[in-house]
Amino acid sequence: MAGIYIHIPFCKQACYYCNFHFSTTKNYKILIKSIQDEIYLKKKFLNKEKIESIYFGGGTPSLIKSEYIKQIIKTLKAHFKIKNNCEITFEANPDDINNQKLKIWKKLGINRLSIGIQTFDNAILKSMNRSHNSLLAKKALKKIKTQFNNYSIDLIYGAPKSTIKTLKKDLKIIKDINPPHVSIYNMTIEKNTVFYNLKKLGKLKFPNISSVLKQYQIIHKSMIELKYINYEISNFSKNNFISIHNSNYWKSKKYIGFGPSAHSYDLKYRYWNVSNNQKYINEINKKKLPEKKEKLSKNNIINEHIMTRLRTIWGLNLKEIKEKFQIDLYSIKKNELNLFKKEKHIEIKNNTIILNKKGKIISDYITEKIML
Ligand SMILES: C[S@@+](CC[C@H](N)C(=O)[O-])C[C@H]1O[C@@H](n2cnc3c(N)ncnc32)[C@H](O)[C@@H]1O
């Protein structure tokens, strides 16, 4: 089983925190044609392995005509073995949603939507340069609920201007809407973004670290009370709505990416496409793959395994590590593991290391200490 990722590199406008690859130009047609050509060029990549998830991310896939999405799905079906009940996720923004589009997306086979909301606070949305407001988001979600039972909401916490009060307001709205899946990310300040430059100039105030930690604790507590499963640090789902695509990344399954900046992984190599639309189109026109690749060393693979497994509810199984990589991680990292255990950051049950609530907050630090 494997997954497919399609990167649609267009946005209406730039969000001040985002450094994912996108362009605000509108040469959609030629780029979609190149994505179809790339699918053809890479049709042997997964050797007819069955595809159990397809993810349209961006950028903003909901910005382009549904006809283009239809063409991509048709090309994928022609060259890959897609499982019957394949999870097909589509990222959409509130300002692109109407009943007609929802109907068309459903007809194309899309069975899961991921909605970029970020917050329901209008002042924060404005400071992020989002193109929707809270009312529009609520209206879009109402429409989505009538046609899709599987959808997810993206939220960000720890953003400039965010407070415990704005967070609690967001969580109250989540309670009322009761979505089957929510991804709640801690705002990271990425290079080449407006927020990064403002922060460097000292012109942007961020909530301090203790407020951000408190925000995560409140999120965790409220979401568990609302009966969500915290199956990965930033991901919460109701029973039966765990995302297959996301989970496969954390279970280190193979995936193939199409479109500028998309990544692929085949257990031995990591591949990444050029993050520039025109360069991508030019290479594809020459029938060349616009990618770079890196062979993963044994340590790279073990560290990746540690990092991804630790983030999840399933945890890091020491016996699996021993069988797969012939190393005894517990003996190698005995001091670190015992310290984290003593400090109640991790639990070790049935030979499996699992982060507890305290550990999730400093997960990056713990991962770094346990990696080889
Ligand atoms: C690449 S975005 C695209 C989704 C959608 N087009 C949108 O505009 O929201 C996917 C998600 O990544 C998250 N994200 C992007 N940049 C982030 C940052 N700097 N910190 C935290 N989360 C971020 C947001 O929650 C966003 O919904």
Image (cartoon, grey):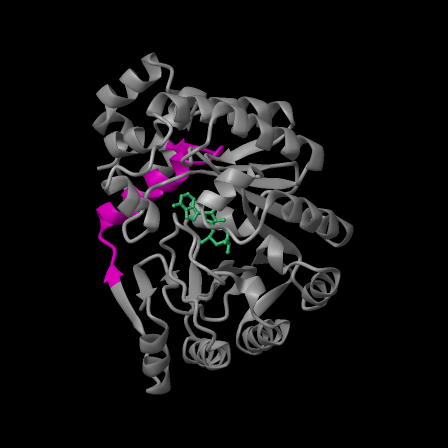
Look at the image and say whether residue 309 sits in the magenta stretch. yes
Q: Nearer the viewer, residue 263 or 156?
A: 156
Residue 134 spot, x, y in % from top left: 61, 43
| Residue found at the far bottom of this picture | 286
The mark total stands at: 0
Residue found 64% across the figure and 34% down from its top: 174
Quadrant of the drawing holding the C terminus: top left
| Residue found at the far right of this picture | 146
Q: Nearer the viewer, residue 39 or 361?
A: 361
| Residue found at the far top of this picture | 342
Residue found 59% across the figure and 67% down from its top: 82
- Residue 308 in view of the camera: yes
Q: Is residue 147 left or right of residue 306?
A: right
Magenta segment: 294-317
Q: Nearer the viewer, residue 31 or 129?
A: 129
- Identify whether 10 is placed above or below 141: below
Residue found 53% across the figure and 72% down from its top: 80
Residue 298 spot, x, y in % from top left: 24, 49
